[in-house]
């Protein structure tokens, strides 16, 4: 559980960054872009365009998306 909280802490919500969309902290890469790339067949090719992303960032995006869905009304 603690690892999940640490991962979610990598997500930033700031109205001055990407119109307040959730992004990987310290980047302007929205969680939604990561999810779109994961939906593609060949992940390595697509993530090559985002060299600053780490596996931990991608994991954080997935955990954030799951948590968001769990709390959706």
Image: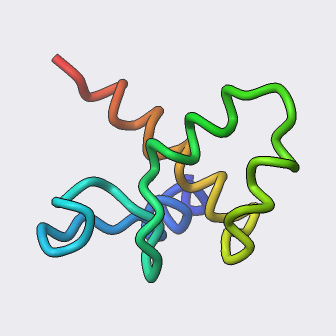
The count of marks equals 0
Q: Quadrant of residue 54?
A: bottom right
Left or right of 33, for residue 57: right
Residue furthest to the top in view is 73
Who is closer to the viewer here, 63 or 28?
28
**Residue 43 horizontal/vertical position (percent):** 82, 41
Instruction: Name the residue at 67% across, 77% down.
Output: 52
Instruction: Name the residue at 74% across, 73% down.
Output: 51
Q: How is the image coloured?
A: rainbow
Left or right of 61, for residue 68: left
Vertical position of residue 26 compared to residue 42: above or below: below
**Residue 48 horizontal/vertical position (percent):** 80, 61
Instruction: Name the residue at 36% across, 25% down.
Output: 69
**Residue 29 horizontal/vertical position (percent):** 47, 63
> Quadrant location of the C terminus?
top left
Instruction: Name the residue at 48% across, 70% down.
Output: 10
**Residue 5 horizontal/vertical position (percent):** 48, 60
Q: Quadrant of residue 25?
A: bottom left
Vertical position of residue 8 compared to residue 52: above or below: above
Left or right of 44, for residue 4: left
Residue furthest to the bottom in view is 26
């Amino acid at each position: 559980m603690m690892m999940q909280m640490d991962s979610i802490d990598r997500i930033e919500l700031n109205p001055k960054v990407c119109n307040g969309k959730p992004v990987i902290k310290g980047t302007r890469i929205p969680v939604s872009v990561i999810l779109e790339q994961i939906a593609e067949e060949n992940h390595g090719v697509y993530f090559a365009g985002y060299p600053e992303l780490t596996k931990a960032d991608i994991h954080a995006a997935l955990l954030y998306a799951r948590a968001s869905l769990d709390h959706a009304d």
